[in-house]
Image (spheres, grey):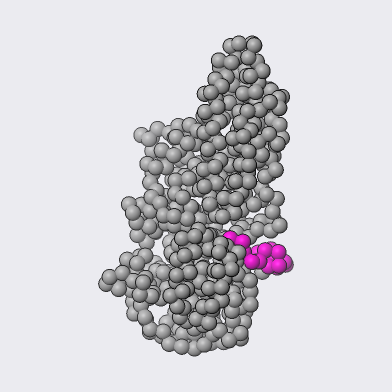
């Protein structure tokens, strides 16, 4: 089995922020999870480097577009390892291999009869690099996303015959109801299609030269969105030197995107693939906005929470946990430093960290670190079917719900500690067998949730498994009572140390 997951490629007209981290972490959770299931995974991310926003930002800074792209691409490339992301390739749309593949595919689209010369006139947002329809414009002819005044553009363009794919796209949505997830995002995309599709610009004229040249008309460059979308296919042709991975990994299993680029990925992209004679992706997973003070987090609006500050103070696992725990994946949600610290203290430090410390300390204190070898485990019913439930949630893109299922068991283990009170059982030799069962149950429960959390909290899980004397983190080890038996444990230092707010 193979699994191909992508992030959108990030625009290099600014530095990385929490929104970029959010999408990358989500993709990494899916990549790690499918590796746990024994699948051959390809995880792609990268940068989008052409188009008018880059040209304008470079001009403002007195740099060439390539110089700005080179500078900011390195920042995004450095982001992935800081997030503990395990991407297999980082694509740049200025890569010569990408540009050549874009020209080849779009020439094929033209030869297939889906490109014609036309004239465009309308309102355009230079930050979105997008021509706006009436439903995307605020009062005063302003962009509904960036709230800036739109410019009126008029130029000769090559057009992609999107309208020719009206019926085929409607059929796609009918035949593959989970093509777009979650359901409300599918409904948005389908409503856009059913409202009637019009042909869209495939190229920009002489006014803009920062892009991939149109091979049949060198005065034009391809509209940045077509150049960018094709990265998902072009990367496979050169990610591994001397080998084309397309046959193994195409079509993509999951594209993860924000809802602001829904129409490009859920409408334009499948139509373009159909026009090129290529298979469409299996799923497009659309997440909502991270909000601060009810406004979308955006570098252009200046309302960002710095992920690097959080990582430096609390560690990467804390950031990964918060982003997928506090905001239900797929919907919009408010984020704040205060909410982050509350989750850190109550759930990471107390629920999981304290559980691990208490359980390991009790085994060391009452059994010299040797885990009782008993098959008489409690809580079997509480854990029954948990790996299957978690996997089903992740297969539907329900990352938050999957994490919630695991966390319910973390809390169940904490309640079990209070119910059994091992410190009381240890005082009565006649209750030795009950103490053995309690300790063995707690260790097995801790081992199980640790394996299940490996995709979400990779560093914490690695530390915990090492303390439990096992490295087995495959999906076959995620079942309670069926994984490798833990024989000996060490006393654990706090996994999530308390932080003094005054020291921030």
Residue 248 shown in magenta: yes
Residue 47 place in picture, x, y as percent: 52, 64
> Left of 474 or right of it: where is 491?
left
Q: Which quarter of the figure has residue 272?
A: bottom right
Q: Residue farthest to the left? A: 140
Relative to 250, residue 107 above or below: below
Q: Residue at x 27, y 72 (%)?
A: 140
Q: Position of residue 34 (x, y in %)?
A: 64, 52
Total numbered badges shown on the rendered structure: 0
Where residue 110 appears, x then y in whole percent? 58, 84
Query: Would residue 160 appear left or right of 489 to someone viewing this image?
Result: left
Q: Is residue 272 above or below residue 399?
A: below
Q: Position of residue 94 (x, y in %)?
A: 55, 70
Residue drawn at (41%, 84%) of the image:
120
Residue, x 61% and y 37% (percent of image)? 383
- Looking at this view, is 444 or 6 the one in front? 444
Q: Eyeballing the image, is 492 above or below 252?
A: above
The quadrant in which the N terminus is found is: bottom right
Q: Is residue 285 visible?
A: yes
Q: Is residue 57 magenta?
A: no
Nearer the observer, 74 or 11 = 11
Magenta segment, principal secondary structure?
loop
Which range is magenta?
Answer: 238-254
Instruction: Give the quadrant of the C terminus.
Output: top left
* Residue 81 visible in the displayed image: no
Q: Residue at x 37, y 35 (%)?
A: 501
Question: Which of the two residues, 356 or 231, is positioned nearer the viewer here?
Answer: 356
């Amino acid at each position: 089995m193979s699994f191909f997951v992508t992030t959108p490629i990030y625009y290099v007209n600014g530095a990385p922020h929490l929104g970029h981290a959010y999408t990358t972490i989500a993709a990494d959770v899916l990549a790690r999870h499918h590796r746990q299931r024994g699948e051959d995974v390809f995880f792609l991310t990268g940068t989008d480097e052409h188009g008018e926003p880059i040209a304008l930002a470079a001009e403002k800074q007195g740099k060439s577009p390539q110089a700005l792209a080179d500078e900011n691409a390195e920042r995004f490339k450095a982001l992935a390892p800081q997030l503990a992301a395990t991407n297999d390739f980082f694509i740049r749309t200025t890569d010569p291999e990408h540009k050549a593949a874009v020209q080849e595919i779009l020439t094929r689209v033209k030869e297939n009869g889906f490109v014609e010369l036309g004239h465009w006139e309308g309102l355009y947002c230079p930050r979105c690099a997008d021509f706006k329809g009436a439903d995307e414009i605020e009062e005063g002819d302003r962009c509904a996303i960036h709230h800036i005044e739109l410019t009126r553009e008029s130029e000769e363009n090559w057009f992609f015959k999107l309208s020719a794919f009206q019926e085929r796209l409607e059929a796609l949505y009918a035949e593959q109801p989970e093509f777009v997830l979650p359901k409300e995002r599918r409904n948005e995309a389908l409503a856009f299609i059913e409202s009637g599709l019009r042909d869209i610009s495939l190229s920009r004229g002489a006014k803009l030269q920062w892009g991939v040249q149109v091979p049949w008309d060198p005065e034009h460059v391809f509209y940045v969105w077509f150049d960018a979308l094709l990265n998902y296919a072009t990367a496979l042709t050169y990610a591994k030197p001397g080998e084309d991975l397309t046959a193994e990994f195409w079509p993509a299993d999951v594209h993860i995107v924000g809802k602001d680029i829904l129409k490009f990925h859920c409408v334009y992209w499948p139509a373009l693939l159909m026009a090129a004679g290529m298979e469409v992706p299996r799923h497009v997973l659309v997440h909502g906005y991270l909000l601060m003070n009810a406004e979308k987090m955006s570098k252009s609006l200046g309302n960002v929470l710095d992920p690097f500050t959080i990582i430096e103070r609390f560690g990467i696992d804390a950031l990964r946990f918060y982003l997928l725990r506090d905001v239900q994946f797929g919907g919009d949600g408010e984020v704040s430093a205060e909410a982050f610290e509350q989750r850190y203290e109550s759930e990471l430090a107390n629920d999981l960290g304290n559980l691990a410390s208490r359980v390991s300390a009790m085994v060391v204190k009452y059994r010299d670190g040797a885990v009782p070898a008993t098959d008489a485990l409690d809580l079997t019913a509480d854990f029954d079917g948990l790996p299957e439930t978690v996997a089903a949630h992740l297969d539907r893109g329900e990352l938050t719900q999957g994490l919630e299922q695991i966390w319910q068991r973390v809390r169940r283990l904490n309640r079990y500690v209070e119910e059994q009170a091992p410190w009381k059982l240890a005082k009565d030799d006649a209750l030795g067998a009950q103490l053995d069962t309690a300790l063995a149950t707690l260790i097995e429960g801790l081992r199980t949730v640790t394996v299940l959390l490996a995709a979400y909290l990779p560093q914490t899980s690695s530390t915990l498994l090492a303390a439990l004397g096992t490295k087995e983190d495959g999906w076959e080890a995620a079942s309670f009572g069926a994984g490798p038996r833990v024989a000996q444990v060490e006393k654990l230092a706090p996994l999530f140390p308390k932080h003094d707010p005054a020291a921030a």
